[in-house]
Amino acid sequence: MTEKTEVSICFGTLCFIMGGSAFELLSEHLDEELREKTLIRGMNCPGYCNQTSEYGKPPFVKVNNTLISEANLQKVITAVKKEVLHGADK
Amino acid sequence: MAQTNNATLIRREIITRLCRLYAENRLDEIDRIPLEMAPRNTTAHNSRCCIHKARAIIRYRIMALLGFNVADETDELETLYSYALRSLAGTDRGKGVLTVVDEACTSCVKSNYTVSNLCRGCLASHCMVTCPKQAITMENGQAKIDPARCVGCGLCQDACPYHAIIYVPIPCEESCPVKAIYRNAQGIEEIDYEKCIHCGKCMVACPFGAIMYRSQLIHVLHQIAKPAKPVVAMLAPAVCGQFRADYTAVADAVKRLGFTDVFEVAEGAVLTARHEAGELAAHLESGREFLTTSCCPAWVEMAHKHLPKFLPDVSETWSPMRYSASMIREKYPDAMVVFIGPCVAKQAEALKYPGVDFVMTFEELGSLMIALNVDFQDSDASVPGEVIRERAFAISGGVAGAVAQYYQGEVLKPLVINGINKKNIALLRKLSATKHDYNLIEVMACEGGCLSGPAGISAPAVARKLFNARSGISVDQIAITGF
């Protein structure tokens, strides 16, 4: 079995207030197949929000090693699909 | 219901910036916020024509955030700092809780019906023939509606065989359950405060974020900064649906913001439920047919302004906010009491009765936490704490359920009005005119209850999920069976 795609959601207050609360429903928005291949977890604020010129605007979500700024459900789902498919190629 | 969209996020960014300036003792730099948020040589968000307009809108948003009604502006050159000082001096208090940021209002459409370019300019011209106001003419081979004549009846839309005429809603007007918002002669929306029930639905509905509540936040910041009196916060029952944290962790975070102490409004709700159960029994015994709940301030306002027939049957029991305030004053007689909740209408309620000094929203609480770098991850309070069942006041059906558990009397037949909207208003009118056998009517202005409040942090579905996970009470259980 291939490794699961890891989705790390920033649990900092800033990300949560500025739109990150939507990711509470991320797993409900993934279809069953994707959900099985995904591991959703939180991460303590890595401080990207202090360097917006470099990393972009919050909320931040990491899908495996890709950092998504101004993340929303659609962006994250697209990234998860891409990662899961990429994993299948290997 | 709170939604996180760009309009909400801009409001939150402004609130955060204001809090930061205040905390760093740099309030005199408040006039820089519009410049910082819309800096030179950048393009404005594509919904605004230019950065100058974007700045002007931010300026008016800050004016509302400082507690002013945007319509009360007399001098366009008055600085935001001057407004801030005037606000803190507390000299003037204009009308209403909600205010229209007129610069931001795009005066959507002049008429709700418009002819799309699918119009074939047909020979029959059903639309022209049908229009009772002769508002339709043919120009360049297509029908055209004159907004000055159109009364919005929609007959032309039904008549067009090509479905070429479309209905374009005006979101704020559409969302207002009591027709309190309308276009003035300049085509800008205006709120009629004689009709407004402060439910906040227009604020949530406007895609340009043109409607804001007049905030009291600066006063709260000011009280926290000067330690003369204890500043005590009370957290509305919906608090358990706001953050990824248990009640104790939130209370701890609120203390770290500088509040002296924190109370849970659900404790006041226990008293409301008990007293309301007693009032209900006495009310029915006295020969009245039914009693309606009174914890939702938008509903009470609605009864006063639009459904006076209900007034004798609206409960006079204090809301959980008022009971909580009196509990706080027992412990801290000279405290400044701050209610923090998802509600816009609570501000109007707090102005009506003594006991609560200021009302703050969850959105403002979250933004203040950002400004002061208060995160849950560094909170060491992680014990779930005691579960107060009256947290269910935050959910539609929860109030009736709570009253029922203390009620002793004839068989209870509760009816839950889940959200004040046009359909439910029609139902309420019918209930006031005809005979029915309900004896307890719970009314909540927000569909789903306070968890869907207009100034909450997240979308209702998220708030429900968090509440289920964090409050110790199941939303769905209550929706089905009551308490």
Image: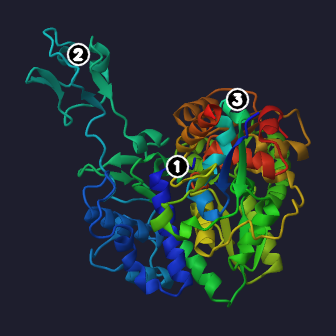
Q: Which mark is residue A32?
A: 3
* Chain under numbered label 1: B
Horizontal side of B421 relative to B329 (left or right) equals: left
The reply to whether dot 3 and dot 2 touch (C-beta < 8 Å) is no
Label 3 element class: helix
Any part of residue A89 in sight: yes
How would you rate the neighbour count of disc 3 (Cα within 10 Å): few for under 14, some for 14-19, many for 20 or more? Answer: few
The reply to whether dot 3 and dot 1 touch (C-beta < 8 Å) is no
Residue at 79% x, 65% y is: B249
CA gap, disc 2 and disc 1? 37 Å
Look at mark 1 in the image and give the residue it sits on.
Answer: B305
Instruction: Name the one closer to the observer, B365 or B99.
Output: B365
Q: Residue furthest top?
A: B124
Instruction: Name the one closer to the observer, B423 or A57.
Output: A57
Classify residue B340 by image quadrant: bottom right
Horizontal side of B72 relative to B296 (left or right) equals: left
Inspect the image, locate mark 2, and give the three-letter code of the amino acid beneath it.
Thr
Colouring convention used in this rendered image of the protein? rainbow
Residue A43 position, x and y percent, is: 70, 58
Dot placed on the residue nearer the N-terminal end, 2 or 1: 2
Label 2 element class: helix
Classify residue B319 by image quadrant: bottom right
* Chain under numbered label 3: A
Residue A7 position, x and y percent, is: 66, 47
**Considering the image in quadrants, where does the C terminus of chain B appear?**
top right
Label 1 element class: helix
Q: Which mark is residue B130?
A: 2
Residue at 30% x, 50% y is: B106
Do the residues marked 2 and 1 share a common chain?
yes
CA gap, disc 3 and disc 1? 50 Å
Horizontal side of B428 relative to B110 (left or right) equals: right
Inspect the image, locate mark 1, and give the three-letter code of the amino acid beneath it.
Lys
